[in-house]
Amino acid sequence: MRLDRVDERIIAILGADARTSFADIGAAVGLSASAVKRRLDRLVESGAVRGFTVILEPAAIGWTTEAFIEVYCRPRTSPAEIKAGLTGYAEVTSACTVTGEADAMVQVRARDMQHLEETIERICAEPFVVRTKSTLVLSRLVDQSMLSGSADRPSAGGRPSAQSSGSSTGATSS
């Protein structure tokens, strides 16, 4: 499903504050509350919007250590095997297959270095893992979602993105 400018504005508003009422969104985009609800229902049904959630700051629950783990797998390990092996880890915040020497890149959060070490050891024990290489995060420099005002910023090439020619709500998420 391709989003139009109104859909993009609705999503940007909800990205900044998912508790915004349909009436307030409608006022911002020039639609009635019921029209906003219908559009949002359509976005959810199509899969363009996957859900609404609370974004927890890991440090609030004491998980202050973050790392990226390069995972090197046995030959012919499928992405499905990697996904199945890593899905049950509370510490894994994301995992992707990647280009380059490693087969996958895994982002993890942990309470402390001991917890991180235990997590890495458990990942290393997965049957598909040959070896890992870890990189500790010292500080986050950029941490934004697709909704963080990206429609209003020029792309890396200096040209505005395809979305940026429409009006904007100015809403950003933090």
Image: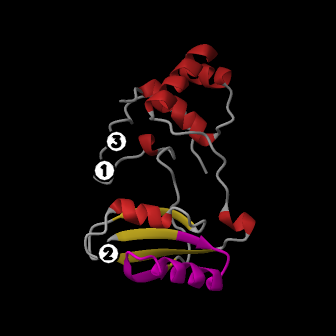
Residue 102 numbered tag = 2
Q: Quadrant of residue 160?
A: top left
- Marks 1 and 3, Cα distance to the nearest angstrom? 9 Å
Q: Amino acid at mark 2?
A: Ala
Residue sitting nearer the eye, 46 or 82: 82
Q: Residue furthest front?
A: 127
- Marks 2 and 1, Cα distance to the nearest angstrom? 31 Å
Residue 161 numbered tag = 3
Q: Which residue is mark 1?
A: 158
Quick one: SS at disc 3?
Answer: loop
Image position, residue 66 (x, y; %): 57, 73
For marks 2 and 3, give the one nearer the viewer.
2
Above-or-below relation of 40 to 65:
above
Image position, residue 96 (x, y; %): 39, 62
Q: Which residues are magenta?
A: 108-135
Q: Residue at 64% across / 80% down in the picture?
A: 115
Q: Residue at 54% across / 68% down in the picture?
A: 140
Quick one: SS at disc 1?
Answer: loop
Q: Residue at 28% across / 52% down in the picture?
A: 157
- Residue 32 in sight: no
Residue sitting nearer the eye, 11 or 81: 81
Above-or-below relation of 125 to 81:
below
Q: Amino acid at mark 3?
A: Ser
Q: Amino acid at mark 1?
A: Gly
Quick one: SS at disc 2?
Answer: loop
